Each structure stands twice: as structure tokens, then as C-alpha cells.
Image: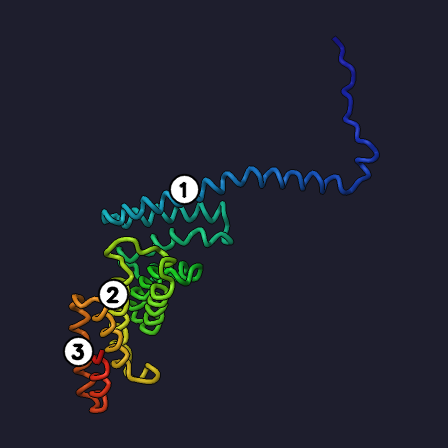
Amino acid sequence: MARGPKRKPTVSARTAGDPSWGVRLFGLATVLAGVAWLPLQRAVLQHISTDVESSLALLGQGKAEAVIAQLTSARTLSNWVLGAKHASNHVDLDYALGRAFMETNRTQDAAREFERVVAAEPRHWAAQANLGSALFLLKNYSGALAAFQESITAVEYMGSAVRPPLESAEESPQAVLAELYLQKGVVLLELHPNRCAGATCAEFAAQALRQAQILSPDLQLATQLLVRATTDLQSNAASSKEYIKALFDE
């Protein structure tokens, strides 16, 4: 049976002559795409959260390499879907990845991850402390000292708002502060005596170690290093004896 010619779609003169018609269609398409994109973003955030939680369990099992592979893939997915502007969503991921790098002695990579965390969240005490440890191993003593001090400040002044929270007895603020002051003292002992303003670095080290000892009398390393620091002070300058006496006067 013969077919007639196909009818061509007609375009009204108003539509054809309206330059904003295409803009409207594009806007509508963009809105619809955004609506469809939101569930995907939420799914990715949930995926990251799940990966971080499971990575902490893997770290406890000594499977740091598996953690690195898992979180690196999660970050790639997150960057593709969420973009760099959502870096704050990566804080827990970056922190866990930094810990995994520390476990595998990839200290430079670990320092980079912890720097990502503190850039997004400066009062993340655990990231600051781990950054201090990484920089110390890299012999960046000034950077390590600054990181430990930031960690101490976060724990001392943030109280219940500290991040991550101190929930267990082993992670009470007092116990954490004792360890942080100990690490601060260790770094100060490595600095050149004249690198500290207002007093010698050994004096500041003794002060930090004494604070660690007060907070945790059972912290034997703090006591041992404090003996070393005060012995050095006594042998270097007679005037330091008064400083040492004042240090132990309570």
C-alpha cells in the first residue's frame, strides 16, 4: 500500500524566533541532572564512611596494605563524584590513610595525608599528633614541635568538642596530654639549644617532660628523659640550677 509523505514537525514562529527557548531547555536539563546526581553523592559519602570504618578494623589486624588500596580507590571515586570542593568529606579517609602509611613506613606519604586533615580541620588533635610523629621521623623538628603544640592546644581547650572524641579510659584527656607533652619534650631535646626563644630548648624540654610526669606519674620514659634533661642543664650552666629547683617546686 502506498504511503504518503511523512509530515515534518512544525515549529511555531514564536518558538523558532525565541532565542531563550534553548536556554530554558538547557536549564531544565541541568536541574534534572542535579536532582539525579544528589542520590549518587549521598551513596558515595556512605561508601566512604563504610570504607573508613572497615579500614580501622583492618589496621587492627595488621593489614595496612589492604587499607591503602581500599581507601585510595574510595578517594578516586569521591574526587570524581564530589570534586575537590568537598575535601572536608575526606577528613576521616585521609586520617585513616595516613595511619596506614605510617604502619608501612611510608612516612612522607603519611605526613602528606595528615597535612590534608589539619588543613581542613586544624583542631583534629590525633592528626596533629600523628603529623608531629611523622615530621619527627623526617627530622623536621620545628614542624613536629608545632604539630604537637597544636595537638596539645586542641585537647586542653576543646574539652568535649575535641576531634576525634576521647571516649575510653585509655584516651582520657589527661592520659593523652601526658603522652603529647612527652613527645613535645622529645622533640625539644633534638632541637639545637639556641633554636628556642626566651630560654634554651633543654629548659623547655624539661618543662614539657615535667608536665608529662605530673599528668601521668607512671610514664617512665618521661621520668627518664627528665633526668637526662636536668642533668644536662646542671652541667651546662650554674644558673640553670635555680630553673630546675623552680621546675620541681609545686
Query: Which residue is at a point 18% across and 66% down the rendered structure image?
Result: 219
Please state the horizontal and vertical placement of residue 127, each as a whole percent of the image. Answer: 35, 60
Is 7 displayed left or right of 59 in the figure? right
User: Which label sits in the foreground, 1 or 2?
Assistant: 2
In the depicted structure, whether residue 182 falls above or below residue 228: above
The residue singled out by tag 1 in the image is 47
Q: CA distance from mark 1 to mark 2?
A: 34 Å
Return the residue nearer the eye: 10 or 6.
10
Q: Quadrant of residue 32?
A: top right
Q: Pointers 2 and 3 in contact (CB under 8 A)?
A: no
Label 1: element kind:
helix
Identify residue type, mark 2.
Answer: Glu
Q: Which residue has dot 3 on it?
A: 228
Task: Please state if 120 lies on the left or on the right of 205 as rendered.
Answer: right
Instruction: Work out how far the residue at label 1 is from the one at label 3, CA to CA, in angstroms.
Output: 50 Å
Left or right of residue 29, residue 182 in this image: left
The residue singled out by tag 2 in the image is 179
Give me the C-alpha separation between circle 2 and circle 3.
Answer: 18 Å
Name the image quarter holding the C terminus: bottom left
Closer to the N terminus: mark 2 or mark 3? Answer: 2
**Badge 1 or badge 2: first in the primary sequence:** 1
| SS type, badge 2 | helix
**Which residue is the extreme one toward the bottom?**
238
Three-letter code, disc 3: Arg
